[in-house]
Image (cartoon, rainbow, N blue to C red):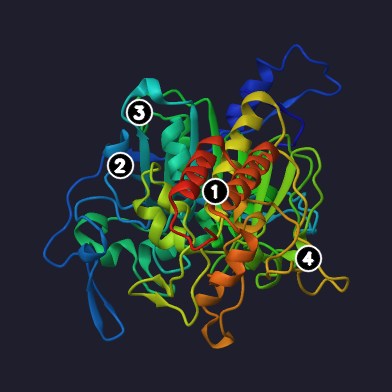
Amino acid sequence: MVISQRKIRSLRAVATLSALLCMLTACSNTSDSNPPQQKNQAANPAIEGPISGGGAADCCVINFGPLAIDLRTQGYVPGTPFYAGVSFDEAEVGYRETEYFISGSAVSYIATEELHPEGNWRVQAADAADYTSRIVVLRPMDAAAFNGTVVVEWFNVTGGLDAAPDLTQMHTELMREGYAWVGVSAQRVGIEGGGAFDLPLKIIDQQRYGALQHPGDSFSYDIFSQAAQAVRHPVGLDPLDGLSVERMIAVGQSQSAFRLVTYVNAIHPMLELFDGFVIHSRSNGSAPLSQLPQADLATPETVFIREDLPEPVLTLQTETDIFRLGSVSQRQPDSGAIRLWEVAGSAHSDVYTTIKGPIDRGDDPTVADVISNNDARPPFISCPLPVNDGPGHWVARAAVAAVDNWVRSGEAAPAAPLLALNPQGTDFLYDQFGNVQGGVRTPYVDAPVARLSGDGQPPANAAFCGLFGTTELFDAATLGVLYPTRQAYIEAIDNATDESVAAGFLLPKDAQLIKARARTSDIAVGS
């Protein structure tokens, strides 16, 4: 067990007894004047599964405005786990998908002192409530292919359903390198209902998910911890079916990132669970520590990641997040285990996350094409302007690989320049083609074929379309000036790609796909 100097603050009797036993045994030979103390283990939930069945006659049809939409036409297969992620059969790439119900008693938390912006928060357990939630597990079929790292994603519920945007953006790297992935239904909306499109598990398939019960988001942090505990230190049923977990990385995008900021600052220091974090597309502030009907405990308007943690935390931000979501006030200098990557040409969500990614098996170079497409997520979201088709997913893969390597080897993730701002700090600085300067660079902005932005949709469509940014393809004249010959285009892509790989922001296997597509693309460059 890893030694920590932090004071044990959990009120759970089992965890307290465990800590005391550790102090009386492993810690007994240390100086009595300054004895090291142990982090707690999260409580182990009861586990049921693998879950099967569902898909009764009333399954899968939802009302969306005047439309009745059968989710089977959207790629969902009844009798399988429901969440927005990849839509191909994972067995095609050597992976097995299973689902488990987890249940137990979760606690909420209250602060024991004022919550300050620097994030060094002290909390203790407060109320307790019973819950039954679920986890989805993707693991290599061949146990020998497992690389020892589990990526645990906090399902995003902004759309009113459980979604796995980080799995969608990162899955080709995870699956080619042998990671396991676990998605956690940590929040109430994904199970009980609410949110933009109101597609909770109980509505999608009452037969399969009717037994689930969520007491509210004040308990989400402990539900997430217990889900991770069930995977890392299983008691009885093992969701990974015998795989030996060596490292565990938590990831979450957008609303899930907001909650992970609070989790990292308040909950993680007390528990022996995660070895690293990728916090993806956060806003200013963070999610409440607790909320009604429990104690209403908002966090400060400005929140930084606490800097006293040994575990690496990489915050991955898009252009959209800086001003639209207000994270410009939370820009945090790299220090110790803290890294901040801001990606030029990227948006909070994009074409890859909703259209390309779910069907990408990782071997198709055409995924590198920049396309012009107004349908952000048909039939649910269509935007006035073509939405962003930038480099976000390529850099997300590099981010999780960098954190994994950091945990394995101690080699820190590379530092990145920030996106360039005007002297007033109110907008970005742009190059001659309208792309943002600075930040994490990729061939999408250093050998561009389009103006890629995290903003630009009309204000009247800001609710969702505003998060998807814009793509404006260059006309033939501009392309001809940039790339007078086909070879000039290939060389520009090669050089920009190599620079991104050397900087650590693009993985070599992804670089091969981008370079391969440059050689076969029908983009209208010079002769």
| Disc 3/disc 4 C-alpha distance (Å) | 46 Å
**Earlier along the polypeptide chain: callout 3 or callout 2?**
2
The residue closer to the viewer here, 240 or 172, is 172
Q: Label 4, label 2: how many angstroms apart (C-alpha)?
A: 40 Å
Residue 236: mark in rendering: 3
The residue that appears at 77% across and 73% down in the rendered structure is: 427
Name the residue at the front extreme: 527
- Judged by depth in the image, the label closer to the viewer, 1 or 4, is 1
Whole-percent x, y for residue 127 in the image: 55, 56
Rendering quarter of residue 355: bottom left
The Cα atoms of the two marked residues, 1 and 4, are separated by 26 Å
| Residue 223 on image: x %, y % | 48, 49
Q: Crowdedness of circle 2 by 10 Å Cα count: few (<14), some, many (20+)?
A: some
Q: State the CA–CA distance, disc 3 to disc 1.
A: 38 Å
Label annotation for residue 394: 1
Q: Secondary structure at mark 3?
A: loop
Crowd around label 1: few <14 · some 14–19 · many ≥20 (10 Å): many
- Lateral position of residue 126 relative to residue 235, left or right: right
